[in-house]
Image: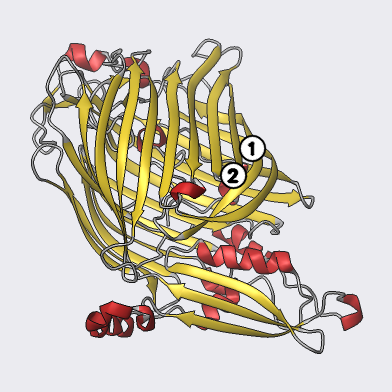
């Protein structure tokens, strides 16, 4: 635990309390007399029907699987026996359980008794939690992309333990991680990850006390992260230009919220971020053959093109957080999952972070004098067969007077994602999905570059195609659920897809104006076991380009990169982000787990 862990451990005493025990007269809705927990294993073999010939295999899987402990489930509930009955707390308890990746289904409901009291039933089903994955890329032949072995629910107590090898272009991380959502028996989330990169090492630890559901009043975070790596720029010819980057981040933040409903969030924190480029310009390298283990020094002219993005050094900031949140959750099936039911947010959420520089230095040795601002907006709505989700974020530094960087805005990064789902009653097995996604950077003094291709862009192109500073992508999909061949065992469906998008050169190194590019394709979607919220996608997409002939690309992904789970977690944007501090961090599940 880092030195500031003790500060956040005080938040353990602030766990959302169950309603204080009171006489029945103070509980007009009645008291909760008993809580029953019925936690099922992964497979319910009694529902297999025609697939009974394989029942032995699933019985064996249930035996090998360690079921989530009843004590863990009870600890997550926002009610206790003897509390006043509260429908909102029951609903939030069920949603908190469903946020865990190792629980596929959780229902929490009350049954009124003849004496006026309530019996609360907690009915859950586990996901399979031991995962051994080998990642392979098929874009240009078969390419090994990594492997990992992870247990997401060790001993049935919600602990995640894993080891991994991740290889993606220049990235090659070898390491392990451990995380727990019940650190020392509290609601503190603890996480540590460490390992090696191609050029050094990485370490990250985090202790997080999130707002508990929509009724929690306090939150806090302590984070420390250090990473030695290389930032990859792509050229139009497909050469990778590699810039060594050492990055160190620390923050401690506390927040609280007021109001009901319509929550006002206030927070205060201290953060420090350091970014250095060891050996620049002589350390810049090129990978021309696609083998990032075999590189060569860059020529001085190429290295000089990166100079404008090596200006950010280090800064310490005092951060003020303000937010307004008015969110409710609804349950809908078949959005990103095939048949599984997902909790989706409806309403508005606005968060603002303002960071005042209180120390630091620029590359020219002068003090930093800036004001960091980050604004995030979320909106979600539904009307009959329609569901809409919109999320946007913009951040940047306002340079104040007497600064080595001049004045005006610097390091402005913005992104917006809009998702539309249509589930017409007359086409019950179809979910029509549309996405509009835009991102970009302006006046950049830190490493930044986007590309048009890849699984989150125009999917008919390799990821390094068409580098630029600004990107816009539109996507259409028809996601079709098929009740075949074994609907009680797994979900199966297929997808028709089309993408169109473009990049603009902007002011990033090697940027190009791509013009509008398109791709069409089809794919399979598989969910196992049936009813899971997770899916595997197998997509085949080919460019629509009359000028040149391009081969179709086959991709396999272990989650849906274009849906609600992905929104505003673009890897290319996240690697350049200045800060993750904001009111939204404490209300959304942490992306590190």
- The x, y position of residue 524, in whole percent, is 26, 50
Tag 2–tag 1 contact (CB < 8 Å): yes
* SS category of the residue bearing label 2: helix
Q: How is the image coloured?
A: secondary structure
Displayed quadrant of residue 16? bottom right
Displayed quadrant of residue 581? top right
Residue at 43% across, 26% down: 439
Q: Nearer the viewer, residue 550 or 384?
A: 384
Q: CA distance from mark 2 to mark 1?
A: 6 Å
Residue at 26% across, 25% down: 233
* SS category of the residue bearing label 1: strand
Q: Is residue 496 above or below residue 532?
A: above
Q: Nearer the viewer, residue 34 or 508?
A: 34
Q: Is residue 72 above or below residue 176?
A: below
- The x, y position of residue 348, in whole percent, is 66, 40
In the drawing, does residue 370 fall left or right of residue 274? right
* Neighbours of disc 2 within 10 Å: few (<14), some (14-19), many (20+): many
Q: Is residue 44 above or below residue 339?
A: below
Residue at 31% across, 37% down: 497
Residue 3 shows up from this direction = no
Displayed quadrant of residue 473? top left
**Residue marked by disc 1:** 351
In the drawing, does residue 456 fall left or right of residue 577? left
**Residue marked by disc 2:** 584
- The x, y position of residue 313, in whole percent, is 43, 27
Q: Is residue 464 above or below residue 398?
A: below
* Neighbours of disc 1 within 10 Å: few (<14), some (14-19), many (20+): many
First in sequence: mark 2 vs mark 1:
1
In the drawing, does residue 33 fall left or right of residue 185? right
Check residue 9 in the rendering and tell me which mark sits there, or answer none: none
């Amino acid at each position: 635990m880092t030195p500031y862990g003790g500060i956040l451990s005080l938040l353990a005493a602030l766990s959302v309390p169950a309603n204080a025990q009171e006489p029945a007269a103070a509980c007009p809705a009645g008291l909760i007399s008993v809580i029953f927990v019925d936690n099922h294993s992964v497979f319910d073999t009694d529902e297999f029907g025609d697939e009974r010939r394989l029942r032995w295999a699933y019985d064996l899987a249930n035996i090998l699987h360690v079921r989530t402990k009843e004590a863990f489930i009870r600890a997550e509930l926002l009610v206790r026996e003897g509390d006043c009955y509260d429908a909102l707390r029951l609903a939030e308890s069920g949603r908190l359980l469903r946020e865990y990746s190792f629980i596929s289904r959780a229902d929490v409901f009350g049954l009124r008794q003849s004496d006026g009291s309530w019996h609360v039933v907690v009915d859950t089903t586990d996901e399979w939690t031991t995962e051994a994955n080998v990642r392979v890329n098929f874009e240009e032949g078969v390419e090994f992309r990594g492997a990992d072995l992870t247990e997401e629910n060790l001993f049935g107590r919600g602990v995640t333990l894993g080891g991994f090898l991740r290889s993606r272009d220049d990235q090659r991380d070898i390491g392990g991680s451990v995380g727990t959502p019940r650190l020392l028996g509290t609601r503190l989330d603890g996480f540590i990850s460490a390992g090696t990169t191609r050029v050094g090492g990485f370490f990250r630890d985090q202790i997080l006390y999130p707002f508990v559901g929509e009724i929690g009043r306090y939150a806090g975070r302590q984070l420390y992260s250090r990473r030695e790596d290389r930032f990859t720029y792509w050229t139009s010819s497909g050469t990778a230009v590699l810039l060594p980057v050492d990055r160190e981040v620390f923050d401690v933040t506390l927040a609280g919220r007021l109001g009901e409903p319509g929550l006002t969030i206030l927070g205060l924190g201290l953060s420090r971020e350091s970014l250095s480029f060891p050996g620049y310009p002589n350390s810049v390298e090129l990978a021309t053959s696609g083998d990032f283990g075999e590189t060569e020094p860059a020529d001085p002219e190429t290295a000089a093109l990166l100079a404008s993005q090596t200006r950010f050094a280090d800064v310490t900031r005092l951060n003020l957080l303000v937010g307004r949140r008015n969110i409710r959750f609804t349950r809908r099936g078949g959005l990103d999952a095939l048949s599984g039911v997902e909790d989706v947010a409806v309403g508005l959420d606005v968060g603002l972070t303002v960071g005042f520089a209180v120390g630091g230095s620029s590359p020219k040795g002068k003090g930093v004098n800036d004001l960091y601002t980050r604004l995030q907006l979320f909106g979600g709505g539904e009307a009959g067969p329609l569901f809409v989700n919109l999320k946007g974020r913009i951040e940047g530094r306002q340079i104040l007077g007497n600064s080595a960087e001049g004045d005006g805005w610097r390091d402005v990064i913005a992104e917006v994602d809009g998702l539309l789902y249509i589930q017409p009653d007359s086409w019950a097995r179809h979910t029509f999905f549309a996405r509009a996604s835009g991102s970009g950077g302006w006046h950049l003094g830190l490493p930044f570059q986007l590309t048009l291709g890849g699984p989150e862009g125009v999917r008919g192109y390799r990821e390094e195609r068409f580098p630029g500073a600004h990107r816009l992508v539109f996507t259409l999909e028809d996601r079709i659920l098929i009740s075949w061949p074994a609907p009680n065992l797994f979900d199966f469906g297929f997808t028709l897809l089309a993408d169109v998008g473009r990049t603009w050169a902007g002011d990033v190194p090697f940027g190009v104006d791509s013009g509008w590019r398109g791709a069409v394709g089809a794919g399979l979607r598989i969910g196992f076991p049936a009813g899971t919220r997770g899916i595997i996608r197998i997509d085949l997409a080919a460019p629509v380009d009359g000028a040149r002939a391009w081969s179709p690309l086959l991709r396999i992904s272990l989650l849906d990169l274009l849906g609600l789970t992905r929104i505003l977690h673009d890897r290319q944007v996240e690697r350049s982000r200045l800060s993750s501090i904001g009111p939204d961090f404490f209300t959304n599940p942490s992306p590190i787990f």
